[in-house]
Amino acid sequence: MKRSSTLPITLGELARIQPLAGAEAHLADPSRQVVQVVLAETFDRLRRCTPHNLVVLHDEAATGGWSLAAALHLAWERNLSAVVVSRSVAGGSSVALAERLHMSLIVIDDDPIEVALQLAGQVSAPAAARALRQARLAEQLAEQTGIRGVLGVLNRELQQVPVALVVGGVVIGGQSAALTERPQVRQIEVEVHAPGERSAARLVAAVPVPGPASVEQVESLLRLARPSLQAAWAQSRLDTATRAAHEQAAFDLLRRLPSAPSPADVEVPGWTNELGWQVGEANRAVWLAPLRPSGEPPPEITYLIRASWQRGHTTWPLVAEGDGWISWHSGADPSEVTALRRALAAFRDSAVAHRLVIGVGRAHAGVAGLMRSVAEARLAAHVAREEGPGAVQWFDQVGANAALAWLPTTEIAQVADLTLEELMAAKDRAALVQTVLAVLDSGGSLSQASQRLGVHRNTVLARLARARQLGLTYDEPGQRLALHVLSYALTTLWSDTTAD
């Protein structure tokens, strides 16, 4: 098997280095190999060309549109890789003819003889030509200051090979098509290390096989881009951290303002405009929360959440709060939610990947209104946990049942361990508690409870009798409320454990 450095160079590679980098290239097949360059001054020389040759037309063979048309037909008959011709000869009809023949046509502005000599040297030494291409690419990468710029250079250079920067399973830059598994496409990965040699992300490319570039060539280019990407990422993290600290401090200041004697009259501080905030308008808060809270999230997770949430909405804030994050959308029309719904839809994949739920508050005006909407959004997020990762709950649809979302289910379950020892030791405790909860939720109706559980009415009666024997006396008026809450807490806790 030949090494990639000794393989014949392709049209796509030649088109990315001088002298063809500045030419007008109409490539029918960028992956077509070039084994020899021929400077054809006559049609007789053109007829003696062998397949996979690249022909540079000159003199008699490039005298006008008719000669180029004849040359394209001959090139097609001889199975040549491409035809290179001066711009003074080529026209729109020539390009159209090349497309119909599926023949690559490259239009140049430089002297054909000089171009042919340079191309001949590159074709005869493919390793040197590829090194020249990498040097040019390295210069372009060094000029980039952001992640998007680095990935843009790679995707422009590789064209038919999508490239993405991935952290975990989340694409934070580039083309998501790089992660799509397709036939005759090979995925390659290059680790991107953070300071301390810790793997922080992956550069992923989907390489068609066969295609315009070999797997080895693509991997080499990805490794070449890694230092620029690391530098851009470090700068992005620094800028993000600075912005996050600024927003956190500003939000803390805003939160103190409504504690004034007349919250409705609180003036919006002028410094909010520096952050792009429009707090004086109608504010609708969004609370992003983990499905299973586990304390304050690490900075790396906050960085990823911020990048995903603010994609396309760079002026929207994101403030870490407890085990979640706060954001909001401001607008003159309180009923306008189109932009917010689009943002939620775009964020759904990230929410599922990070196992987040989302609560949305109502629109309220001013600083005090924002704080009220934040409280509503947090309550709605607690309710959304019942639906699983990616769930979105609007406060308008919550109702009084939101109170159940705040129950300390773990603590209540500990009470059950002490007060209902026999029940908690039973193997069928989950079915018994679930049945009692269904009956209480149905107002004591056995038929409704049986329909809700999907079991026969007699099964419900049997479970109730056994629950009563084990101490769950749900029908005693003095204990009904407490046992109803306890049954709800236990069922919720056990359902969450099963789901996890």
Image (tube, rainbow, N blue to C red):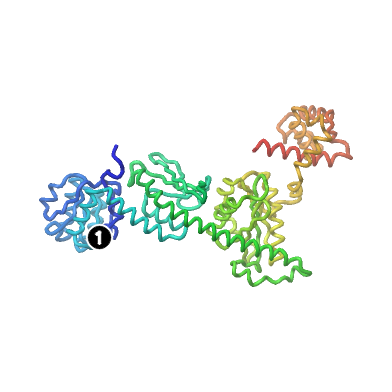
Asked if residue 28 can be seen in this view, the reply is yes
Q: Residue at x 55, y 48 (%)?
A: 349
Q: Nearer the viewer, residue 9 or 496?
A: 9
SS type, badge 1: helix
Left/right placement of residue 411 relative to residue 66 reads right
Residue 117 is situated, as x and y percent measured from the top left of the image, at: 19, 55
Q: Amino acid at mark 1?
A: Gly
- In this image, 299 relative to 42: left or right? right
Q: Can you tell which quarter of the image residue 58 is in? A: bottom left
* Residue 141 at x, y percent in the picture: 40, 57
Residue named by callout 1: 92
Disc 1 crowd rating (10 Å Cα; few below 14, some 14-19, many 20+) is few
Q: How many marks?
A: 1
Residue 346 or residue 327, whichever sits in front:
327
Question: Is residue 364 visible from the viewing direction of this image?
Answer: no
Q: Is residue 132 left or right of residue 78?
A: right
Q: Position of residue 218 (x, y in %)?
A: 37, 47
Establish if 279 lies above or below 48: below
